[in-house]
Image (spheres, grey):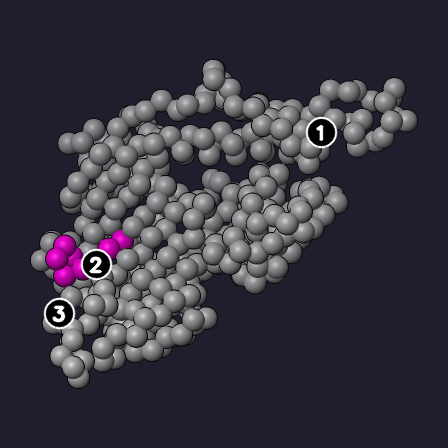
Amino acid sequence: MPATQAVYGSAEVNGQQLELVIGGKTPRDSSGKQSSTETNVVVETQQTNKAASGKVTALGDGVAGDELAINLTGDTVFTGTIRKTEDAIGDRTRLVAFDALHDLKRATISETFDTEAAASALRTVADTAGINIDIRGDASEPITATFKSANGDAAVEKLTKLAGKVWYVSVENTLIVTDASSVGESKQLDRIIDASAGKRSPAYQSVKVIGNTPTSRKGRQSRQLVSSQPVSATAGGGDPVYEYEDDDIASSQQAQNVADALLQRLRKQQRGGFVEVLARSDIRPFDTVVMPPSRGGAEYLVEAVKHTVDAKNGYLTRLQLGGVITA
């Protein structure tokens, strides 16, 4: 998209489309005071540790609790629940919304799941948080886990690790639980405004996971009949090694699921800098992006995306990048 091309966007509140206000003349009230309400669009999404947010100024009304969807150049880039509103001069209203991860983080989970199917446990957490969930693929792996006043996102993180799944919140504001292989797409980058991305070695080369011992599950009377070695698994190779212990890990498969998930997470946390491009509403966290040949052609993981639209700079997309995938 050339820098001079028009940017089309809209906001929908409970399905009703409203016009966005981006720049333009600032209106005055009856006393002649100009409005100080911001008129830029800001949408920020990350992988899992922070709720996605959307901020717009629209011509129309919206109240806390309404659903807000933000569309830019034909793509929905955000859907969430309005948490804050600011009435401006005239028909302008500044709307601030957060996605389902906000509700998940605020939910308190106090549950014990005893050899319960992972899908059932995950639905219990989603129901407690009052959010929609879509579980894709087989999640019948029996898990055992106890949560005492845990945040909902921490509970989902643990349950998905035990089941060998990953999770994220979609642009439709639904908690998605699926296989890691089905998450993310590869996108080619062009029209780069600014970039600072380079190779770095991950802090950890391998992961060792230790679960509970058979004796702890069967009781003292069985100590002579079973091995006292704990359930364990490794992923990756080389030093340094990241060690993780969790007594809720009850099988070798669960231990391997957790080891693989942790290694993937550690590699994604390898910082790779950022890149800023023109108008890329199609890129989401968990995607990978390929730099142009003139910049080395390396492929990076996308950790976070920030879309901004304002009268000065137009529509820019800033990508926070993780580790290099291929050189």
Look at the picture and state if 124 lies above or below 58.
above
- Depth check, mark 3 against mark 2: the one in front is 3
Secondary structure beneath label 3: loop
The residue at 36%/22% (across/down) is 201
Task: Looking at the picture, tell me which residue is in the foreground, 189 or 241.
Answer: 241
Task: Looking at the picture, tell me which residue is in the foreground, 116 or 21.
Answer: 21
Q: Amino acid at mark 1?
A: Asn
Q: Residue furthest front?
A: 31
Residue tagged 3: 24
Disc 3 + disc 2, Cβ < 8 Å: no
Report the side of 39 relative to 133 (left or right): left
Sort mark 1 into few (<14), some (14-19) or many (20+) by Cα contacts within 10 Å: many
Question: Does the image show residue 25?
Answer: yes
Looking at marks 3 and 2 on the same chain, the residue that comes earlier in the sequence is marked by 3
> Residue 194 appears at what percent x and percent y?
17, 40
The majority secondary structure of the magenta stretch comes to strand
Q: Amino acid at mark 2?
A: Val
The residue at 45%/45% (across/down) is 49
Secondary structure beneath label 2: strand
Task: Looking at the picture, tell me which residue is in the foreground, 34 or 22.
Answer: 34
Residue tagged 1: 212
Quadrant, the N terminus: bottom left
Secondary structure beneath label 1: loop
Question: Does the image show residue 137?
Answer: no
Q: Which residues are magenta?
A: 307-314
Give the quarter of the image for residue 3.
bottom left
Looking at marks 3 and 1 on the same chain, the residue that comes earlier in the sequence is marked by 3
Q: Is residue 220 magenta?
A: no
Residue tagged 2: 309
> Residue 117 appears at what percent x and percent y?
69, 47
The residue at 79%/29% (across/down) is 216
